[in-house]
Amino acid sequence: QAKSRGRSRVALFEAAMDEDLHHRRRIEGELRRAIDGDAVKVVYQPKVCARTQRIVGVEALARFVDADGRPVSPSVFVPIAEESGLIAGLGERVLRTACADAARWSIGVAVNLSPAQFRGDDIVDTVKSALESAGLDPARLTLEITETVLVNDPEGARRRLDALRAMGVKLALDDFGTGYSSLVYLQRFKLDSMKIAQGFLEGLAPDTDAMTVLSSMVALGHALGLTVVAEGVETVRQVELLKRAGADEFQGNVFAEPMSRAVLEAMLASGDGAVIPLRQAATRA
Ligand code: C2E
Ligand code: MG
Ligand code: MG
Ligand code: MG
């Protein structure tokens, strides 16, 4: 009996695997066809100055809608795109769109680069070409990379990052604190900013270990000359505590969710000079 139960569990497991694989294959196929079409879009999430709450830049985020019209999360389709070799095309689409859009604004734009995009030397030419065809000042483009990029191939990464820096592009370390070798890489690579991973904001309260860790991370970033950005900021309370910790910039739904170019442009053009009031946040928190 135990044996047959074991077998049926295996069957269930295999069925789940099949379904998962089927789902992944479907997404991959749709993504392959969609990369140059309407199913892939770019949205922008504002980043605000901690002091003025004025929009100082935006992060470009890819959005993908499947054949049934359902949005698929980037945490699902980005890994699929990486494993199937589609990330180069997807990433270039996002990069070109973001550069072309940002050329219409006065603020900067940040684009995520996945480890797979960073593996080849092509990335330097791709960035250069995207900047040139958009006519965007390189200083207004930030590339967000994760530690994985630096760990996998430190020599190649250094060469490519140096070439990008020489071009005038800014570099940010994304999801800081989620890797294991952060400190080594932070001091070895020349970066402009670090984004503290959202996890550090969970359960944040005064006089707690969480608060001590957060303040130390901000101090570390500043000691290294980096702009410290907090991401995934969801509540007014987090905003207050992040200010206390000394963070420079905030990004999160408490200020604004990712939005279309049109909505962002309306916001930038609004009378309040693109200052996002916390009133918006207060109703949510
Ligand atoms: P990320 O680069 O760390 O981007 C921040 C993520 O936090 C975004 O998720 C954003 O929508 C989300 N977020 C912002 N504010 C809040 C908040 O207040 N609460 C919560 N819970 N979440 C918030 P998203 O858009 O789902 O993207 C997830 C990840 O997928 C990104 O993390 C990035 O690693 C990757 N990704 C997205 N677009 C691209 C892309 O064009 N290229 C590459 N290579 N990766 C991308
Ligand atoms: Mg990012
Ligand atoms: Mg992040
Ligand atoms: Mg990330």
Image (tube, grey):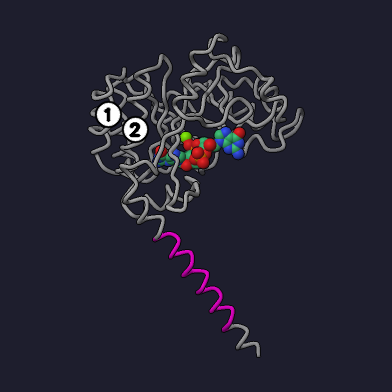
Q: Earlier in the sequence, mark 1 or mark 2?
A: 2
Could you tell me which residue is drawn at 63 percent across and 36 percent down?
Answer: 200
**Residue 207 in the image, given as x and y percentages of width and height:** 77, 29
Q: 10 Å neighbourhood of mark 1: few (<14), some, or many (≥20)? A: many
Q: Residue furthest front?
A: 68
Residue 197 shows in this picture: no
**Residue 211 in the image, given as x and y percentages of width and height:** 70, 30
Could you tell me which residue is drawn at 53 percent across and 24 percent down?
Answer: 228
Magenta-span inclusion, residue 4: no
Q: Residue furthest right?
A: 207
Q: Nearer the viewer, residue 57 or 211?
A: 57
Q: Residue furthest bottom?
A: 1
**Residue 173 in the image, given as x and y percentages of width and height:** 45, 32
Residue 221 shown left or right of residue 87 in the figure = right
Per the image, the residue denoted by label 2 is 95
Q: Nearer the viewer, residue 284 or 195?
A: 284
Residue 202 figure quarter: top right
Q: Nearer the viewer, residue 74 or 264?
A: 264
Residue 80 shown left or right of residue 131 in the figure = right
- Name the amino acid type tagged 1: Ala
Per the image, the residue denoted by label 1 is 130
Q: Is residue 189 above or below residue 149?
A: above
